[in-house]
């Protein structure tokens, strides 16, 4: 009835799945979603080329909520703050559908003027601990957020 070529092609179509496990942590080359209204972030997300993580600024190299990361976006290097993660969090910290980032400049000022998604309330205490008198002021990210979860 059927030739061997038809059978082989149909089996090939059925086996179109991945065997590797899904990585839920932020590490190098992880795709991120820009959730503020910065011009470079809106343009990159509209083109379907989301930023990728280049460096996580902590000792472990695995990004947690509130960590600063270096991202490659539109051929440029920008810094950002992680405001929502897919990975399982501690108690009372929500789990998001995507890995969200807010772009900042070197002194901690956000590049956008509004954050479109709700951010966790635990981020207030995390960012206040990371803000130093002479260093960057990360609490400005909290000022442009409109909703907290």
Image (cartoon, helix red, strand yellow):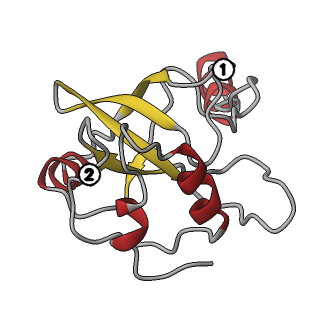
Query: Looking at the image, is 119 positioned above or below residue 35?
Result: below
Of the numbered discs 1 and 2, the one sitting upstream in the chain is 1
What residue appears at the point 78 percent right and 53 percent down from the top-left corner? 89
Report whether residue 84 is seen.
no
Whole-angstrom CA distance, mark 1 to mark 2, is 57 Å
Q: Nearer the viewer, residue 120 or 30?
A: 120
Residue 122: give its label: none
Quadrant that contains the C terminus: bottom right
Residue 5 percent location from the top left of the image: 59, 18
What residue appears at the point 54 percent right and 69 percent down from the top-left corner? 119
- Residue annotated with mark 1: 8
Q: Nearer the viewer, residue 103 or 41?
A: 103
Cβ–Cβ under 8 Å for marks 1 and 2: no
Query: Looking at the image, is 91 positioned above or below residue 41?
Result: below
Query: Looking at the image, is 43 positioned above or below residue 125?
Result: above
Q: Is residue 87 left or right of residue 92?
A: left
Disc 1 element = helix
Disc 2 element = loop
Residue 96 percent location from the top left of the image: 63, 61
Closest to the camera, between mark 1 and mark 2, is 2
Residue 31 percent location from the top left of the image: 45, 36
Report whether residue 78 is seen.
yes
Q: Residues within 10 Å of mark 2 (few under 14, many from 20)?
A: some
Residue 33 percent location from the top left of the image: 41, 50
What residue appears at the point 28 percent right and 72 percent down from the top-left corner? 114
Q: Is residue 144 left or right of residue 130?
A: left
Quadrant that contains the N terminus: top right
Residue sitting at the far right:
91
What residue appears at the point 21 percent right and 61 percent down from the top-left corner? 112
Q: Is residue 104 left or right of residue 38?
A: right
- Residue annotated with mark 2: 109
């Amino acid at each position: 009835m059927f030739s061997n070529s038809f059978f082989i092609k149909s089996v090939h179509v059925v086996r179109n799945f991945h065997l590797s496990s899904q990585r839920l942590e932020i590490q190098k080359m992880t795709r991120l979603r820009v959730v503020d209204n910065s011009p470079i972030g809106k343009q990159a997300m509209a083109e379907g080329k989301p930023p990728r993580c280049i460096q996580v600024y902590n000792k472990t190299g695995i990004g947690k909520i509130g960590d600063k990361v270096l991202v490659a976006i539109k051929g440029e290097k920008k810094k950002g703050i992680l405001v929502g993660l897919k990975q399982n969090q501690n108690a009372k910290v929500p789990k998001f559908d995507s890995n969200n980032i807010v772009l900042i400049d070197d002194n901690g000022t956000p590049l956008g003027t509004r954050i479109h998604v709700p951010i966790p309330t635990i981020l207030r205490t995390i960012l206040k601990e990371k803000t130093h008198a002479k260093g960057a002021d990360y609490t400005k990210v909290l000022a442009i957020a409109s909703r907290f979860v």
